């Protein structure tokens, strides 16, 4: 069992949260009991994840998508109230890390996805406060478009949508998990053959074809599971916690 404050302080420093101007607060979002023995991880602090944590008698929850996003109504009513009420009634703390978890060079979503795809990171782009969020690297051997689709499906257990922007084989790729399709212009400017992210917008189709870069929409949830998994496992080793990841179904 470890102190909640010690876990939060350690994780905030590890992920350098003070360096990010994010869309939400990073770190402890909802206070819980002061000691943590069992930590539950997930992508989003949805009602289903909260109920799973309550059923597991968890002391804290670690997620990538928490609460209190910029631009949303600040009132704690409706769905937000029900979620926060569940946490408070159960005495469960909520820790959420957004951009700091995307960007971390070891435990981050992008670093972990690159590792799973077998791609070594050679550089970064899409800077936020001079910190690169997206990554790029070389495949060990050039792949056909269909081969890269197959590799993504094998890793993520989800068939990606591929917008083919050229006929050549793919060797240099960029990737940024989640809703990062807007970085396709920067990826193309780097001369990459393909860019992988989670979601796709209507205009992404045209951008890929006109910029000559192939785009893979591999799923927001599917691409952002691995940062919380890696970070939670690390915290369990540092603080002698029980950690488990709840991979709740989400087709998006």
Image: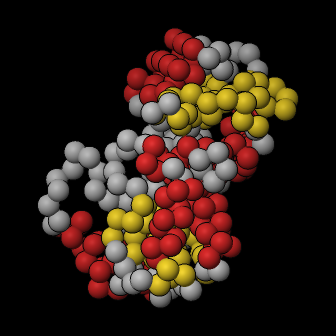
Question: Which percent across, then down, holds residue 72?
Answer: 21, 50
Give me the residue at 46% from left, 18% from top. Answer: 206
Query: Is residue 214 visible in the rendered structure shown here?
Result: yes
Q: Is residue 18 above or below residue 62?
A: above
Left or right? Give the position of 4 relative to 113.
left
Residue 174 found in image quarter:
top right
Give me the residue at 73% from left, 49% from top. Answer: 116
Question: Looking at the figure, which quarter contains the N terminus?
Answer: bottom right
Give me the residue at 43% from left, 48% from top. Answer: 18
Q: How is the image coloured?
A: secondary structure
Give the camera-side residue of 100 and 83. 100
Give the camera-side residue of 126 and 1. 1
Left or right? Give the position of 9 relative to 238.
left
Q: How many marks?
A: 0
Question: Which percent across, then down, holds residue 252?
Answer: 46, 50
Query: Is residue 252 visible in the rendered structure shown here?
Result: no
Residue 48 found in image quarter:
bottom left
Give the camera-side residue of 223 and 104. 104
Give me the residue at 61% from left, 80% from top. Answer: 241
Q: Is residue 245 above or below residue 154?
A: below
Question: Which percent across, then down, holds residue 82?
Answer: 24, 73
Q: Residue furthest right?
A: 141
Question: Which percent across, then down, holds residue 251?
Answer: 49, 54
Q: Is residue 243 above or below residue 176?
A: below
Q: Is residue 42 above or below residue 161?
A: below
Residue 177 found in image quarter:
top right
């Amino acid at each position: 069992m470890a102190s909640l404050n010690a876990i939060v302080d350690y994780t905030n420093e590890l992920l350098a949260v003070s360096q990010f101007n994010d869309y939400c607060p990073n770190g402890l979002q909802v206070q819980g009991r002061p000691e943590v023995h069992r930590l539950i991880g997930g992508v989003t602090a949805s009602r289903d994840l909260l109920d799973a944590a309550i059923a597991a008698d968890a002391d804290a929850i670690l997620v990538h998508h928490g609460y209190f996003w910029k631009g949303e109504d600040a009132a704690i009513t409706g769905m937000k109230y029900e979620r926060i009420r569940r946490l408070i009634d159960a005495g469960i703390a909520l820790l959420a890390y957004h951009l700091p978890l995307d960007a971390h060079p070891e435990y981050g979503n992008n670093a972990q996805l690159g590792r799973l795809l077998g791609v070594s990171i050679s550089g970064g782009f899409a800077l936020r406060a001079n910190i690169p969020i997206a990554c790029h690297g070389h495949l060990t051997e050039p792949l056909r478009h269909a081969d890269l689709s197959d590799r993504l499906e094998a890793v993520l257990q989800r068939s990606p949508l591929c917008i083919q922007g050229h006929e050549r084989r793919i060797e240099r790729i960029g990737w940024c998990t989640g809703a990062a399709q807007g970085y396709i212009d920067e990826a193309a400017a780097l001369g990459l053959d393909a860019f992988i992210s989670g979601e796709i917008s209507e205009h992404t189709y045209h951008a890929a074809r006109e910029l000559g870069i192939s785009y893979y929409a591999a799923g927001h949830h599917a691409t952002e599971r691995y940062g919380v998994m890696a970070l939670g496992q690390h915290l369990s080793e540092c603080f002698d916690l029980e950690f488990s990841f709840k991979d709740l179904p989400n087709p998006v």
